[in-house]
Image (cartoon, helix red, strand yellow):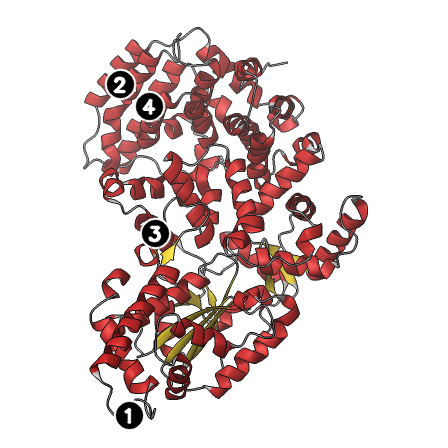
Amino acid sequence: MIVTELLIGKATESLAGIFIEKGWKGMAKIGKMVDLKTQQLFFEASRQYIKNYTDRHGILKVLGMREPVALESIYTTVQFLHNSDIRRFESIENLEKAYRENRSFQSQNSSRQDGLAVANEKQYLMVLGGPGVGKSTFLRKIGLEALKGNKGEYKHECIPVFIEMKRINSKDITLEKLLIHEFDICGFPDAESALNNLLEAGQLLILFDGLDEVPSKIVGHAIEMVQNFGDKYHQNRFIISCRTAAYMNNFYRFTDVAMAEFDSIQIKQFIFNWFQSEEDKKLETGQKCWQILNEATNSGAKELANTPLLLTMLCLVYDHSQHFPNNRSALYKKALRVLLEEWAAEKRIMREEIYKGLRTELQEMLLSEIAYTGYEVDQLFFSEDEILDKIRYFLESNLNAPKHIDCSSILQAIAIQQGVLVERAEDVFSFCHLTLQEYLTAQYIIDNSLIEKMVNEHLLDRRWREVFLLIAGLMRGGSDELLLMMEKAAQNQLSNSISARKIRPLMSWVNAATAGNSSGFSSAAKRATALFLATARDSAFEIATLLSPSLTNVLEMSRISDLARAINPNFSRMLHCNRTPIRPATPTRAFTRAINKAIAQELEDFDLFPYINFTALMESLETLKAKAPNVHESYKVHQGYNSRVSQTWLNALQLNPELTIFSSEESNALEDYLYINMLMIRCKQASMKISPKTWQEIEARMLLVSNS
């Protein structure tokens, strides 16, 4: 049942009935009976009240949306963390451990509660959470359900009143005045008297939204006012929302609950709700958006999607272009600006005095310095004293930074009003998303010309992979220098490493096997394909398919048949290969023998190995296929047959099995070398600008290693 259907009918009658029975009970001027004319006044006022609530609180229009959407059309089920999970961590060490387990600040084991169920159960409810997590949306939804009466999911007969706490901007404003105004503008007769009677009868559901949005100079007064109001009219029901960082456990009657991050189910539901027009349903836009968001290259974007505000931003981005940008730096910059500027502006929150001196650009510089100094030493969580020291140093070392602002005020404003830094436990802070810490780290490296230092110190650290990609996207002058530094490091990896000496003979085979011209494929793509067949390395597979996507089919066929693993006799001892070794072929997997010929045929068609006689290879494979054991033969017989197939491939490829037998150290060296090359390709794809000549030269040299 949607809100627009409630403007007339039983909901209006129910609301008018509550006013007549409770709001006007005992009033002498009305008497015991209410005449038809007065009843009509109540009916029309109730109709107007529902319309007002729906128009003001039943729609969503944020972040530059062209058209508003009905809140209920995109509303996604809200879940709360149990009270014990809100601040369950006692130390930075415990926070670090929990986060590194699943890249989330909420434990996967945290028990969750349905938001509506909790609201039905608790008479006094304090809803906590960071900026943009959906606190206001939840309160508005509860009000809409209450307006539906017995047709809604709110199980108490109450009149909802939604009060934005930012309206309390002076001590002259009282809660009674705000409540009276909500009824008076709808035309209820003698709204003040009616309100008093409704409060005394316990007929109101009062929704105080945004306690943290009260100006700091009167927030103490506002808290006392709400407490006293709740004590005086304790028969009614109350829900308050507040940002976690601003909450001081002031309300003894209230049960504290925290908004849980969106999980995958909620993210998917939100996206499908968002793209619900007839055209989107026909084109399956929601399904496509969800699929793209789940691609590995968009893992950072999906991390942002845990927050409804930033998920809304992602839906708007996808709605505009039907994809997410390859340059993720632009996406993360947009997300940061949403938190630093746009959200407060959208909500018309009065910005504190601090922002007049610390403009957005300076805030970004400050945050990037905090992000980088932490990321450099693998620090994700900061004590309050650490952050205050960093803020103090930033202000003192920057001539144009304001000197009159207290460091604690800056931290409080960033944590409470913007939520870029979040207090995870008492006096322990982190960035709201690791993605944003990575983005700010990349920005700091660009601003302070630290690219060479980063390449020299962190190129092989997989933790820095995303930072490299973001830097490539941020280098507006071009990423040629970055890629050339990475290429030099890749060559040094095999030239100067003792562990890599044995790898060079393998590379000689790669170069010899793929030498010669072939149409449609770069030399680097052919070399990567040969390496994949010889070593079964996923990184080699990735390099080949990134450079030439049309190779994906044949290489996936090789995976299915375990061809690459069969060719490499030492695969089971390659301890650091990314993929788990698959056990040798068994009778249940005999079907894979049938595609060996198809693989050979595609390799011949692609002309990847010009000097290999694929015609002879296919004839040999056909002969072997005729001698394949049946499913009832012993495991030993099947193993012997598979060995003959492998040897046939090795002979055709002219590959000495000894070339692929590595120690653990040698295996690591090869994996590091391939990782750098793969990262170079990813950085090239993420680059804002790169010279075609530079990339052509880099790709021509890729995986080309001399024996000297």
For marks 4 and 3 on the same chain, the one whose residue lies earlier in the sequence: 3
Nearest to N terminus: mark 2 or mark 4: 4
Please tell me the numbered disc located at residue 621: 2
Q: Which residue is label 3 attached to?
A: 69
- Mark positioned earlier in the residue sequence (4 or 1): 1
Kindly identify the amino acid type of the residue bearing the numbered disc 1: Gly
**Disc 1 or disc 3, which is closer to the eye?**
1
Location of the N terminus by quadrant is bottom left
Residue labelled with disc 1: 31
| Three-letter amino acid code at the position of disc 3 | Val
Which sits earlier in the primary sequence, circle 1 or circle 3? 1
Secondary structure of residue under mark 2: helix
Relative depth, front residue between 546 and 391: 391
Q: What residue is drawn where x is 60% and y is 23%?
A: 478
Vertical side of 518 occupied by 183: above or below: below
Residue 605 coordinates in the image, percent (x, y): 31, 12
Q: Residues within 10 Å of mark 4 (few under 14, many from 20)?
A: some
Which residue is at 36% across, 38% downward? 583
Residue identified by numbered label 4: 554
